[in-house]
Image (cartoon, rainbow, N blue to C red):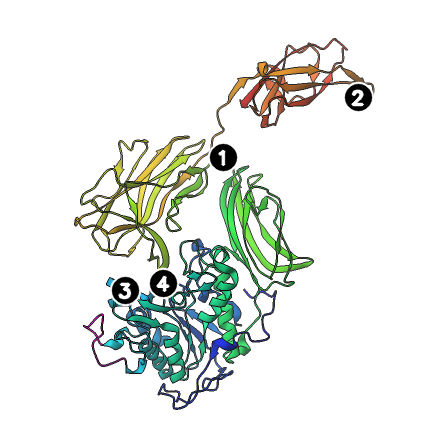
């Protein structure tokens, strides 16, 4: 969607981060002369056919599904900056290095034939090139050369210092960038080198050299890995490749925020590498500004809205009439105009908004400075009747209505049916708190007898994800070592139909596991879901483990799920990696059973005199109730009028209890010594003396 809010075209801010080098032939041969250019003289700026921008990179660039928000790859944000005359193909994939991407069958060998003359290919990498140990053979590279030399051109023709089974060029970042450049140009296309985004590694107020991918000695190796950005610049210089220094630009952004604010607004909570929505858009913006400064596809660039809601739409599916359910949106804004102001957010009927998940209304405001903010917006849907509800959450700054909206949709249904409900754990690293939806509640995950290891990035459904890992040292199953997950039904029955999880062995392939469930707190009578111990491929979630079940959880009862890991080879230090343990099904709602007590003795009552209204022919009075119990009393309360004089009617009665009228009082609690007054209105056509006795009940009615 093309949205207009703030125009970022103007003075180029990347002067120090833009480089294109001339003097070499377009076939990738070495340049005899080098120079810095402000515009691109070796690559055509536009072509008559619609060009494609191909993006090669890792998890910082790749695309993620909406359920992974706020995580976002900056390549996802690129299409919005171009008109329909440019296509963007984001081939980036999590966990890939310049080496592994080059050889993986579904990556470069499959992508290269799709590149046409006149296309553009953005090449990044470096994060996963820094892998070591058992991962070095597949992923690892040195910035220049594994023998410590810094002449990338000469890094060839001898065994690699770490992996001597292959030539030294096979673990050279410089050499792989050179291969991409030459092969792209061989197809008549245009390579663009963009250095990697910084990691959030602070020393005081600045990003460390390692955070800028200048890496020292790794994992007991002999030589420092070297400066990956310098290696990319060297390739750009020698082969006259347009270069955008994203490392320098993201360093400026992150340092301007500082460590705490960058953690809150730029990077996902699980690590210091992967961007949130706001950061992904800022990175893409800097990348496009860099291309504009090099006169690459500048004629196809368009202004872009600076407000991004994530997710961009909300669907509650079906919800019981009167049942409120909340969803969360992350709002990310940059380059707002004016730079300081107030944004007003409004919702349609039956949808309420909150900034703190406590105070609700159909309109909230966000004050901002410096033209930017990141804000959690809570949206609550409460259907008032059985029908479909839909509309848009809208945004405005002053009188200017923004084109950005959030589509909202939900359907109210009667209590006769069930509501899809679930609880899910381990969706953000080691976070034990559950995410729930529907009519269930859940406890934090319990880690019993297991020691947490470090988090690790493993692909989940092809998307790089930081996952929790727990050490599994026992050589056999130990019933005192497990992860436990508990889901509680509400006032109705929970019908569990699926128990699922992502599990794998990490650090080796010898960790195995069982998954079981029970309806008993002591886990007696448990049912095992797997027929034999689950085995895994090292550091790979091959597929979600999903077990169809039929488990009826009675009202207010709990179903417990446990994962028991152990190491079948009897070796130590290996771990179980876990992500997205989920219990799902359908829940119903039943009204709570009445539970009330006679609280008459806890109050003193003061009855006022009667007054007769000649016009309405009604009598009015009041009763003041004072909490004389010495403690806070919890309501709601009912004031019952027993033995009311025959012929007299209490006109403002709420209902009838055991044949006597009562007035319902909605106060949820009354402090010791506090009072409240209840007005009374009678019809008394016979003008008889009015008499009655009172009882006061509190509880659930």
For the point 52% across and 52% down, which residue is it? 329
* Image depth: mark 1 or mark 2 in front: 2
> Mark 1 — residue?
415
Residue 644 found in image quarter? top right
Q: Quick one: SS at disc 4?
A: loop
Q: Which mark is residue 457?
A: none
| Label 2 or label 4, whichever comes before in sequence order | 4
For label 3, the crowd category at 10 Å Cα-Cα, with few meaning under 14, some 14 to 19 and many 20 or more, is: some
* Image depth: mark 2 or mark 3 in front: 3
Residue 557: image location, x then y, percent: 38, 31
| Furthest residue in direction left, as rendered | 569
Residue 114: image location, x then y, percent: 37, 75
Residue 160 lies within the magenta run: yes
| Label 1 or label 4, whichever comes before in sequence order | 4
Residue 284: image location, x then y, percent: 49, 68
Residue 598 lies within the magenta run: no
> Mark 4 — residue?
94
Q: Quick one: SS at disc 2?
A: loop
Q: Which mark is residue 616?
A: 2
Distance between mark 2 and mark 3 Cα atoms: 90 Å
Distance between mark 1 and mark 4 Cα atoms: 44 Å
For the point 26% across and 75% down, which residue is it? 147
Distance between mark 3 and mark 1 Cα atoms: 57 Å
Q: Which mark is residue 132?
A: 3
| Label 3 or label 4, whichever comes before in sequence order | 4
Q: Tell me which secondary structure the magenta stretch mostly adopts.
A: loop
């Amino acid at each position: 969607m093309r949205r207009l809010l703030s125009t970022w075209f103007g003075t180029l801010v990347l002067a120090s981060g833009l480089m294109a080098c001339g003097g070499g032939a377009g076939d990738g041969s070495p340049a005899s002369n080098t120079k810095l250019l402000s515009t691109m003289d070796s690559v055509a700026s536009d072509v008559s056919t619609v060009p494609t921008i191909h993006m090669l990179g890792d998890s910082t660039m790749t695309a993620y599904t909406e359920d992974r928000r706020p995580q976002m790859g900056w390549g996802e944000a690129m299409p919005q900056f171009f008109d329909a005359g440019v296509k963007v193909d984001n081939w980036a994939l999590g966990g890939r290095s310049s080496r592994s991407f080059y050889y993986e069958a579904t990556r470069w060998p499959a992508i290269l034939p799709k590149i046409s003359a006149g296309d553009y290919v953005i090449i990044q990498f470096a994060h996963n090139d820094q892998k070591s140990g058992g991962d070095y053979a597949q992923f690892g590279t040195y910035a220049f050369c594994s023998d410590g030399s810094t002449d990338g051109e000469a890094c060839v023709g001898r065994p690699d210092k770490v992996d001597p089974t292959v030539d030294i060029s096979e673990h050279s970042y410089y050499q792989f960038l050179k291969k991409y450049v030459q092969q792209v140009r061989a197809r008549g296309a245009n390579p663009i080198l963009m250095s990697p985004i910084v990691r959030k590694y602070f020393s005081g107020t600045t990003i460390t050299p390692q955070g800028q991918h200048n890496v020292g000695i790794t994992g007991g190796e002999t030589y420092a890995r070297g400066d990956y950005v310098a290696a990319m610049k060297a390739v750009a210089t020698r082969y006259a490749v347009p270069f955008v220094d994203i490392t320098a630009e993201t360093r400026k952004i992150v340092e301007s925020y500082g460590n705490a604010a960058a953690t809150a607004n730029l990077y996902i909570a699980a690590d210091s590498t992967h961007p949130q929505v706001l950061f992904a858009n800022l990175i893409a913006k800097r990348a496009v500004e860099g291309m504009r400064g090099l006169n690459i596809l500048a004629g196809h660039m368009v202004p872009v809205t600076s407000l991004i809601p994530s997710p961009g739409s909300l669907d509650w599916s079906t919800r019981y009439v009167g049942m409120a359910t909340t969803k969360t949106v992350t709002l990310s804004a940059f380059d707002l105009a004016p730079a300081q102001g107030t944004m007003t957010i409004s919702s349609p009927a039956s949808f309420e908004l909150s900034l703190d998940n406590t105070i609700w209304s159909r309109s909230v405001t966000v004050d901002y400075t410096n033209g930017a903010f990141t804000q959690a917006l809570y949206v609550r849907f409460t259907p008032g009747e059985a029908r479909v509800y839909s509309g848009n959450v809208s945004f405005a700054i002053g009188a200017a209505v923004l084109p950005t909206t959030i589509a909202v949709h939900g359907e109210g249904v009667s209590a006769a049916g069930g509501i899809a409900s679930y609880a899910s754990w381990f969706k953000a690293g080691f976070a034990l708190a559950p995410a729930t939806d529907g009519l269930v509640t859940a406890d934090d995950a319990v880690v019993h007898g297991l020691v947490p290891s470090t988090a690790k990035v493993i692909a989940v459904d092809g998307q790089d994800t930081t996952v929790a890992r727990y050490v599994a040292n026992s050589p056999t199953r130990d019933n005192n070592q497990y992860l436990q997950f508990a889901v509680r039904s509400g006032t109705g029955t929970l019908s569990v139909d699926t128990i699922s999880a992502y599990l794998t062995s990490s650090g080796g392939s010898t960790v195995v596991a069982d998954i079981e469930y029970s309806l008993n707190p002591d886990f007696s009578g448990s049912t095992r879901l797997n027929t034999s111990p689950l085995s895994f491929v090292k550091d790979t979630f091959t597929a979600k483990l999903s077990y169809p079940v039929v488990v009826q959880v009675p009202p207010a009862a709990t179903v417990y799920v446990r994962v028991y890991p152990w190491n079948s080879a009897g070796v130590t230090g290996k771990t179980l990696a876990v992500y997205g343990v989920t219990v799902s099904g359908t829940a119903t709602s039943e009204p709570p059973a009445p539970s009330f007590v006679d609280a008459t003795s806890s109050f003193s009552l003061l009855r006022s005199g009667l007054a007769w209204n000649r016009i309405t022919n009604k009598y009015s009075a009041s009763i003041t109730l004072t909490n004389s119990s010495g403690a806070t009393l919890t309501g709601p309360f009912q004031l019952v009028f027993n033995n009311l004089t025959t012929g007299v009617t209490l006109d403002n009665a709420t209902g009838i209890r055991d044949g006597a009228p009562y007035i319902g009082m909605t106060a949820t609690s009354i402090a010791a010594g506090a009072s409240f007054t209840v007005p009374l209105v009678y019809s008394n056509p016979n003008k008889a003396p009015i008499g009655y006795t009172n009882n006061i009940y509190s509880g659930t009615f």
